[in-house]
Amino acid sequence: MASMTADLALVSNYPMAKSSCMDLGKRVFGVPVLPRIIRSNGRKSKSFAATAVLQVGSIVKESKTEDSLGLDVVTETELREKGFLGLRKTKLVCTVGPACCSYEELEKLASAGMNVARLNMCHNTKNWHQDVIRKIKKLNHEKGFCVSVMIDTEGSQIHVADHGGPSSVKAEDGSIWFFTTEQFEGCRPFTVQASYEGFAEGIKEGDELVVDGGMATFEVIERIGNDLRCKCIDPGLLLPRAKLSFWRNGKLVEKHHELPTLSTKDWSDIEFGISEGVDFIAMSFVRDADAVKHLKNYLYTKNKFIKVLAKIESLESLHNLEEIVEASDGIMVARGDLGVEIPLEQIPTVQEKIIDLCRQLNKPVIVASQLLESMIEYPTPTRAEVADVSEAVRQYADALMLSGESAIGSFGEKALSVLRMASTRMELWSREENQQPTFPQRELGVSLPDQIAEQICNSASRMANNLGLDAVFVYTKHGQMASLLSRNRPIPPIFAFTNEESTQMALNLQWGVIPIFFDLSDDMDANMAKTIDLIKAKGMLKEGDAVLVVSDAIPTVYQSLQVKVI
């Protein structure tokens, strides 16, 4: 059969090592494997850079193989029914709570498309969380799902510690309430315990105390030591652990209290998460990059490959946004708490800015809070909520998250199906209308291998779109090139084959990436042949389909770009 091959080897001007390349005896898609001398700070060191191989080819033949393919059952079913371009790209996160913590309910959510299960450490006991985590891992092992686990730290914030009611208490217009830091047993009428002893510092008479961004509002009428007497001027509900903020003359009173980002309880929860093998830790109320770096360094010393996400939910975090995004492994836009600290009308533009910055810096971003809030009580969402979900998808957020909708709502599975249908429809519309995103302008690579890998992924994404290819296959150990491909938001889905379970679970949060556990060998031709044969055997690839192949799994020198038409 006639073939046409075009090779573009991207090689540095650094001198080649004198050792013979033939000793390695390796060729990757026709590209020789050669060592390279890299100079760093004036010193020479022998290094093997990441492979970046790109191939386009028609899939025309099949061979027998006994290897297994760790493709999750949900993607496999969706692929058979809808084909490559019908696969949903936007990932879905569900908060697990009392309404969905049974094995059966978790299985329903996993079957409906849950990619990540979130556990809020503010609520329930460690035994409860442990039980949920083990149920999820059992579902993955026994039922063939691929659901990652995220724990969300409580964080240090000023909130309602207790209000004397079992769930919520109604504050009536004109009623007088006492907010105190005093710790006492039982309950007192019209008395709210605050969580932080210095919560009233700097507060004046006439200031407004706002509960949960406007669920109820009080005017401070008297300050008594560290406590406040307040009059309700905007009636509403006081919920357990509701966040308290103060406003003066229409502006937030910024309180630079000395609370650490991670409390003693948070560190205990983190140790619990490490012991249970969670995949993500979301840090609440991050104010700067230092706390993120501290936690990541701690996990590194423990030799744990757990990804750290920073939650953007305060005015201070917005002031330090870029350094927080750079330091973290991902971002959660916690719009509920963020809406407490900035004017409501700024939320849409701030959300879009955060999503764009995360994409520029190649960090996955989750849009969270109140996406389908009405579905906590009702079986159908409002049209405005669906529009909100669709807008987050249009902005190319990596993931959407359900909070109370799944944790305590009566229609969690339905809410998840709404997210799935709305995101799939918006993705389809974007393709039909050719509403493709602009490619990121910021160059991330510092070292030469990283720069080459980045440029190859940028080019690969353009080629996949321009040539109308069916899929992108990436063979990866740590997920770097899978992430770089996702950053470009290509039209075809990205199948990421990895032999690292931590990489597989981390890629669950990346837009358009289908992580597959596969026992990679040092022979890239064999890896490609085996994976294609396995996917064909499942009836998900057919003769004539074209895939593009990229790899960073094998250390080599040449970064090459190869097009092969068979």
Image (spheres, rainbow, N blue to C red):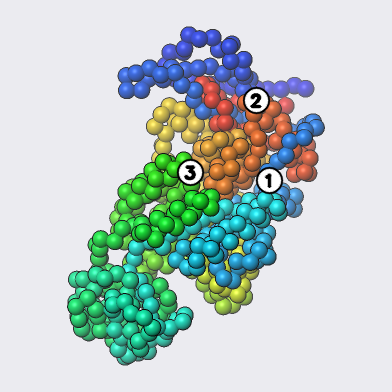
The residue lying toward the viewer, choosing from 553 and 347, is: 553
Three-letter amino acid code of the residue under disc 1: Leu
The residue lying toward the viewer, choosing from 267 and 73, is: 267
Across and down, in percent, residue 113 comes to: 64, 58
Chain-order first, disc 2 or disc 3: 3
Q: Is residue 319 above or below residue 443?
A: below
Q: How would you rate the neighbour count of disc 1 (Cα within 10 Å): few for under 14, some for 14-19, many for 20 or more?
A: some
Location of the N terminus (image quadrant):
top right
Three-letter amino acid code of the residue under disc 3: Lys
For label 2, the residue is 523
Q: Which mark is residue 236?
A: none
Query: What is the CA distance from the residue labelled 2 to the residue labelled 3?
Result: 28 Å
Residue 539: name its quadrant: top right
For label 3, the residue is 304
Q: Secondary structure at mark 1?
A: loop
For label 1, the residue is 71
Across and down, in percent, residue 477 comes to: 56, 35
Query: What is the CA distance from the residue labelled 1 to the residue labelled 3?
Result: 24 Å
Chain-order first, disc 2 or disc 1: 1
Q: Do the CB atoms of the residues marked 2 and 3 lie less than 8 Å apart?
A: no
Q: Residue at x 29, y 84 (%)?
A: 178
Q: Is residue 152 above or below residue 179?
A: above
Frontmost of labels 1 and 3 is 3
Q: Do the CB atoms of the residues marked 1 and 3 lie less than 8 Å apart?
A: no
Q: Is residue 443 left or right of residue 498?
A: left
Q: Is residue 543 above or below residue 311?
A: above
Chain-order first, disc 1 or disc 3: 1
